[in-house]
Image (spheres, rainbow, N blue to C red):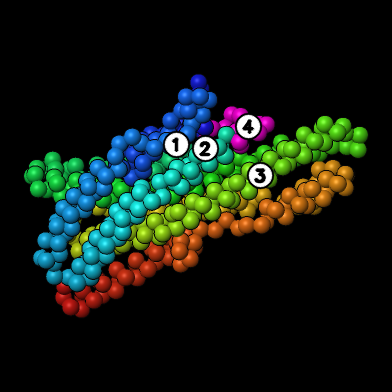
């Protein structure tokens, strides 16, 4: 997995993008591991970085101190209370995201690396199934979503550069760098969750395709005269698929246990940032196309996250629709019992993303937020027109 193939494909290109994204996150100090080849067997594993974590902690404290100083002076000159509240909430969310990164690095570093390695082992197990050797990481869908994520990250790192070209100033440069670094690190948590659920969805898709095509074809050939060796091989393949499904569910539970709180805070940070930018655009405090594109970028980030979660949830439910009525394979009664146990085990757990038990993350969440944002801005416009602030 994440290796280099001779003939580039959508799957191998997506794997390369993931490797480079991991390097970028480690350079920012968001993650403390790198993907490297094991020198003994050549397998890709996540290993701890060699540089000290305290350096990034001190650097992040310095950045956040300058960030708060810039916004505190800006808040003092503001006269609109709604804008002050939004900025204060965004600063608080930025602080929470910074604390989450530090906590994950110092107290949950080993569990996070363990989850990454378990995901890598799952991809190797799936690729070892017959008919899945050509797969590396998903397909065209995963590649398109990853390209959108890369474009969003690139724009967030560079959208402030035109301001520096127009009027270069040291203090302005420091302020813009702090703003960009804080925003990129917060967005990186969102992208980590996006990649994780995209990976889980890709795993479900590959195993589902194998069960519906290859495994079904193999089980259909079972007859009363089938040898014991063939029956044992078919039973081993069925048990391996069930073990993979169970491991995917366990990895999902472990990841949600680690990232439930960070996901909740980063969603709050994204929603508040979108509301703040929309409010700025409403007041015409920033003119031009850059703020509109930045608003679209933040919306794209949240949509990528919800689309990956919705895709993983849908893929986990597809295989549960199978039963002996629509998955007829053989006349052998003993295999009917094995398949019934297989299908019942698939329905044991339900894939659901509910950060801190507050709300379900799905495509409907974006629609709910957009409707609330439009309602809020409409109220602000009406209030401003009555008080003659617009």
Which tag is nearer the camera, tag 1 or tag 2?
1
Report helix, strand or loop for mark 4: loop
In the rendered image, the residue lying farthest to the bottom is 386
Residue 22 drawn at (x, y percent) = 39, 38
Q: Which residue is mark 1?
A: 46
What residue is drawn where x is 59% and y is 51%?
Answer: 249
| Residue nearer the viewer, 155 or 257 | 257
Q: CA distance from mark 4 to mark 2?
A: 13 Å
What residue is drawn where x is 65% and y is 33%?
Answer: 129
Q: Mark 1 or mark 2: which comes first in sequence? A: 1
Q: Mark 4 or mark 3: which comes first in sequence? A: 4
Q: Mark 2 or mark 3: which comes first in sequence? A: 2
Q: Are marks 1 and 3 in contact (CB under 8 Å)?
A: no
Residue 174 included in the magenta stretch of the image: no
Q: CA distance from mark 4 to mark 3?
A: 14 Å
Classify 283 as above or below 117. below
Give the residues in magenta.
125-141
Q: Which residue is mark 3?
A: 243
**In this image, 241 relative to 353: left or right?**
right
**In this image, 252 relative to 163: left or right?**
right
Circle number at residue 120: 2
Classify 316 as above or below 223. below
Q: Could you classify mark 2 by the number of other residues whose Cα lies within 10 Å: few (under 14), some (14-19), or many (20 or more)?
A: some
**In this image, 74 relative to 136: left or right?**
left
Report helix, strand or loop for mark 2: helix
Q: CA distance from mark 1 to mark 2?
A: 9 Å
Q: Mark 4 or mark 2: which comes first in sequence? A: 2
Q: Which residue is mark 4?
A: 128
Q: Mark 1 or mark 3: which comes first in sequence? A: 1
Which tag is nearer the camera, tag 1 or tag 4?
1
């Amino acid at each position: 997995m994440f290796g280099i193939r001779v003939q580039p494909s959508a799957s191998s290109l997506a794997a390369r993008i993931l490797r480079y994204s991991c390097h970028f996150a480690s350079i920012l100090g968001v993650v403390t591991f790198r993907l490297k080849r094991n020198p003994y067997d050549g397998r890709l594993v996540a290993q701890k970085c060699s540089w000290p974590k305290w350096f990034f902690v001190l650097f992040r404290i310095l950045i956040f101190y300058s960030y708060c100083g810039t916004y505190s002076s800006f808040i003092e000159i503001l006269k609109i209370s709604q804008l002050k509240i939004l900025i204060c909430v965004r600063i608080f969310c930025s602080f929470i995201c910074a604390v989450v990164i530090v906590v994950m690095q110092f107290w949950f570093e080993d569990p996070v690396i363990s989850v990454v390695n378990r995901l890598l082992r799952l991809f190797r197990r799936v690729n070892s199934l017959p008919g899945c050797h050509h797969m590396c990481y998903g397909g065209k869908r995963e590649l398109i979503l990853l390209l959108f994520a890369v474009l969003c990250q690139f724009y967030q790192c560079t959208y402030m550069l035109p301001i520096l070209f127009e009027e270069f100033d040291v203090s302005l440069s420091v302020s813009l760098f702090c703003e960009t670094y804080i925003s990129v690190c917060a967005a990186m948590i969102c992208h980590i969750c996006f990649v994780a659920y995209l990976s889980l969805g890709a795993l479900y898709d590959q195993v589902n395709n194998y069960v519906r095509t290859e495994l079904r074809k193999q089980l259909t050939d079972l007859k009363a005269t089938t040898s014991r060796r063939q029956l044992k091989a078919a039973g081993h393949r069925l048990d391996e698929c069930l073990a993979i499904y169970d491991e995917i569910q366990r990895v999902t539970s472990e990841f949600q246990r680690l990232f439930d709180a960070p996901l909740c805070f980063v969603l709050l940070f994204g929603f508040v940032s979108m509301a703040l930018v929309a409010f700025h655009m409403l007041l015409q405090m920033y003119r031009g196309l850059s703020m509109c594109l930045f608003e679209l970028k933040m919306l794209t980030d949240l949509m990528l996250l919800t689309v990956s979660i919705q895709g993983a949830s849908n893929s986990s439910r597809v295989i549960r629709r199978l039963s002996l009525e629509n998955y007829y394979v053989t006349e052998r009664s003993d295999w009917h019992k094995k398949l019934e146990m297989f299908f019942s085990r698939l329905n044991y757990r339900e894939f659901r993303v509910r950060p801190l038990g507050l709300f379900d993350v799905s495509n409907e969440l974006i629609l709910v937020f957009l409707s609330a944002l439009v309602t809020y801005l409409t109220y602000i416009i009406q209030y401003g027109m009555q008080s003659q602030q617009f």
